[in-house]
Amino acid sequence: MKFIITLVISCFIISSSTVSPETYIGKWKIEGGSIIEIYKEGDTFFGKINKRADNPLSNINGLDNKNPIKELQKRPLLGMIILDQLQYDHGVLSDGTIYNADSGKAYDVKVWINSDNINVCYIRAYKSFLFKTFTATRVTH
């Protein structure tokens, strides 16, 4: 009986291994072609636009046109922080926001990587009980 309990506990520990905070750091290509660079300052994670999609849906001029704050509508999208104030907890980045430059709105966000493929991450934007999940692939070159 002790053997079975030990085996079950060992399987649970192995299968619940978490992704380290450093695994998130780097460049990630989102569906559509944009690249976000995730980086860490202290214990907080951020993501900035490193490259825009080849055929953007909006903000064709490369500026933050949809921002509700008029003074920010002239800022360039390249280099702009869109993942803000994320905290690492049990393998997941959360408790921050994601800014959608196509709409000028910010949403709660959760970012995670499955330990079986650390070159794919998922970015989920929340508004109330509604959400949209994006897949991003690590850029290695």
Image: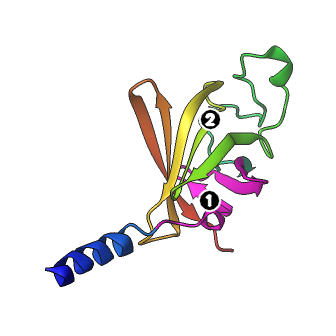
> Measured from the top left, where is residue 26 in percent x and y?
68, 64
37 displayed left or right of 93: right
Measured as percent of width and height from the top left, residue 30 is found at: 56, 53
Residue 33 part of the magenta-drawn span: yes
Q: Nearer the viewer, mark 2 or mark 1?
A: 2
Give the quarter of the figure containing the C terminus.
bottom right
Q: Amino acid at mark 2?
A: Thr
> For residue 28, which numbered disc appears in the image?
1
Q: Residue at x 37, y 75 (%)?
A: 14
The residue that appears at 37% across and 71% down in the rendered structure is 13
The residue that disc 2 covers is 97
Considering depth in this image, is 45 or 135 the residue closer to the camera? 45
Q: Residue furthest bottom?
A: 3
Examine the image and state in which quarter residue 7 appears: bottom left
Q: Which residues are magenta?
A: 18-47
Write down the quadrant of residue 74 in the picture.
top right
Q: Is residue 138 left or right of residue 128?
A: right
Q: Which mark is residue 66?
A: none
Is residue 1 placed above or below 64 in the rendered structure?
A: below
The alpha-carbon separation of the residues under discs 2 and 1 comes to 17 Å
Question: Would residue 61 appear left or right of 107 to someone viewing this image?
Answer: right
- Left or right, 73 with respect to 33, comes to right
Q: Is residue 32 above or below residue 114?
A: above
- Judged from this view, the residue extending furthest toward the left is 1
Please report contact status of discs 2 and 1: CB closer than 8 Å, yes or no: no
Residue at 62% from the left image edge and 45% from the top image edge: 55
Front residue of 90/7: it is 7
